Amino acid sequence: MNNTISLEMIQSANELLCSTLCRMPKKAPAVRKAVQAALPFPVPTYLQSATSNIQLFSNPPAPSSQDVEIACAAIRSLAATGGVTEEAWSLGIVNTAKFTKDPQDAAQVWSSAYPAYNPTEVSRKLSQKEASNSGPTSCGQMAALNEACESACNICSYNGKVSSPIHAAQKYAANKGQIAVMASSIAPAANIADSSNFQPVPVLDPTDSGNAKWLLRYLQGSVRFVTKQNQWIIFVPGDGWSIKSDAQMLHLAELAMRDLGSVGMERMSPENLKRLSAHITKSLNATSLANAVTLLKGQPGVEIHTHELDANPMLLGLKNGQCMDLGTGMVFDMEPNHLVTKTVGCEFDPYAPCPQWQTFLLDVFQNDHDLIDYLQQWVGYCLTGSIAEQQILFAYGLGANGKSVLFSVLAEMFGTYAITAPVDTFMLNGNEGPKSYLLARLAGARFVLANETADGQRLAENTIKELTGGETIAAAHKYGHVFEYRPNFKIAIVGNHKPVIRGTDTGIWRRLHMLPFNRTFAPHEQDPNLVKKLKSELSGILNWAIKGAEAWQVNRRLKVPDTMRKEADVYRSESDIIGQWLSENCNVQVGEKESAAALYNDYGNWCRSNGHQVSNQTTFGRRLSERGFTKKSGAKVVWNGLALLQPTLPFFQS
């Protein structure tokens, strides 16, 4: 048998022991022996001999009377009504008070509502109980006292989980300050620290609308519904805002309805308690839970729009529910009103280094410190929500050059701020731009990575201008509503093939930053574990990026190295098809002129022989006008300022 004892096993054993000791406190040795026999694993000798120091074999602490009241609705009912027999009073109140930290106060306070209340008699009865060998009154005994207690036990959130009111109070006390609103299958959710913080509900609203209001109160207001995106988010102290599915919201609603019977009902009459029990039973059916979640969307302050999330461009979400102000470098706890829903992908450690990362960059960029400085500032700029640079990065290079490794590590560091998008998101499909649902995925991101351009793909130039221009765009998820958002992401396209760019205007070319990867690593230089090694330094790489953000703010712009400018100039020259044709086939000079038909025929022949697509006559004429050539109409259309070097052949003849 495996002798390893897990934390879960210890906790399970401890709970079993505690519940049993509540029933037989004077028989601890026998109880321990019985518990040991019931456990699914053997307890080692060293544990058995160290019972005074091991929680597994220690008596549970007595709860306070306040904790018992909060945990047990039946006690609250008995204390409020005072309408039971003396035998029931003795068993339910006095015998329960005996096991609290403050038995005298508990017995007196809980008995004070009784018509025949006598402090001396309460003290005498308590002394008798303390002298006896009785264990705590069980949950079954409490439920049998009267109809009100039975109803209270039926709707108790501890029903079936504890053996007595004392046991319930011990569980409550152990978890005080950490009461979660989600089960273990869902991350701890709302800002609910202590059920005792709730005020009594004055009037029960037994409707779906009332349930929605209770659900909002149960979640302490830390829930939002992102309209148009049909998405729930919940704020968790220590974690921040996170997305929740419809199924998770239904589970939350179920927990809230079950909790309705044990929170804030300190002075409920038996009749109202019975009505509440019936309402909770009805509210736990699937239709009622779904209605409560649906109506929660309309509660004040719940609905929110996409553009309100992550709206502060200088706030960076960190792990463990913290934020950094990239403008000041200050780190502080996230608050719900920050509406930060994204986090980086690693722990923030201000002292973490990244020596392997820095060596890797020197190898990849062949000790070009200007390129490395640019990359650092660009990555830091990507940490922000600013798109002031209005640019797109194209990382280009053939062979094993390190670009895939570099960008996969960066994507990991960016965490939920990063999205890997299909390269088609930024390419034309025939004459059509990217699909709307592809753009919808990018809302809220700060770093968008597109990999592996195909040969001959054409860049969607108008889309790039829209995404980098700072204006609001419209998008829609598949089968979803159209919504608007303002892009604050930076785009990195990584590939071996340069996309085709037809535009000759500065509007597209000023946006394009070419990052060359010219180093090719031989097989013996390649490390198959490199990505793993670099990812072990993510906290240090985050510090490197934060320093880049600081430098970007100081410089107020990205300084593009000469190497990158030359790459862009070559790319632009290669993409300027008409410019190449003019250079090879035309004499460009004032006083020259040529017929429009002859020029277009020659251009078409040249494109065909060089493997280029031929623009239509309208586009061809517009490109000539953009270069300063003028057109004169008459018997035939003539272009001024250029002439063919050789007579043209018929269109498309070889």
Image (tube, rainbow, N blue to C red):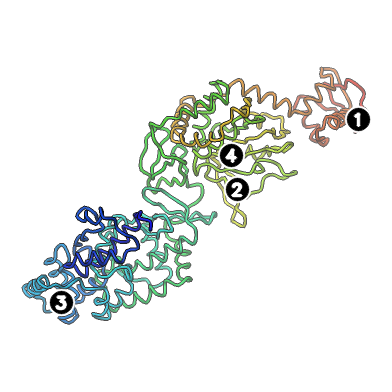
Residue displayed at 48% across by 71% down: 287
Q: Earlier in the sequence, mark 4 or mark 1?
A: 4
The crowding category of the residue bearing disc 3, from other C-alpha atoms within 10 Å (few below 14, some 14 to 19, many at least 20), is: many
Q: Gap in Å between the C-alphas at discs 4 and 3?
A: 71 Å
Specify the quadrant of the image occupied by residue 282. bottom left
From the image, state whether disc 4 or disc 3 is nearer to you.
3
Residue displayed at 79% across by 28% down: 578
Q: What amino acid is labelled 2 in the image?
A: Ala
Specify the quadrant of the image occupied by residue 589. top right
Residue displayed at 17% across by 71% down: 110
The crowding category of the residue bearing disc 1, from other C-alpha atoms within 10 Å (few below 14, some 14 to 19, many at least 20), is: few
The foreground one among 505 and 18 is: 18
Specify the quadrant of the image occupied by residue 138. bottom left
Q: What amino acid is labelled 1 in the image?
A: Lys
Residue 636 disc label: 1
Residue, disc 4: 449
Check if mark 2's residue and mark 4's residue have beta carbons within 8 Å. Answer: no
Image height check: is 315 above or below 242?
above
Residue 474 disc label: 2
Quadrant occupied by the C terminus: top right
Check if mark 1's residue and mark 2's residue have beta carbons within 8 Å. Answer: no
From the image, state whether disc 3 or disc 1 is nearer to you.
3
Residue 463, percent across and down? Answer: 65, 40
From the image, state whether disc 2 or disc 4 is nearer to you.
4
Residue 574, percent across and down? Answer: 74, 27
Q: Earlier in the sequence, mark 1 or mark 2?
A: 2
- Label 1 residue SS: loop
Residue, disc 3: 90
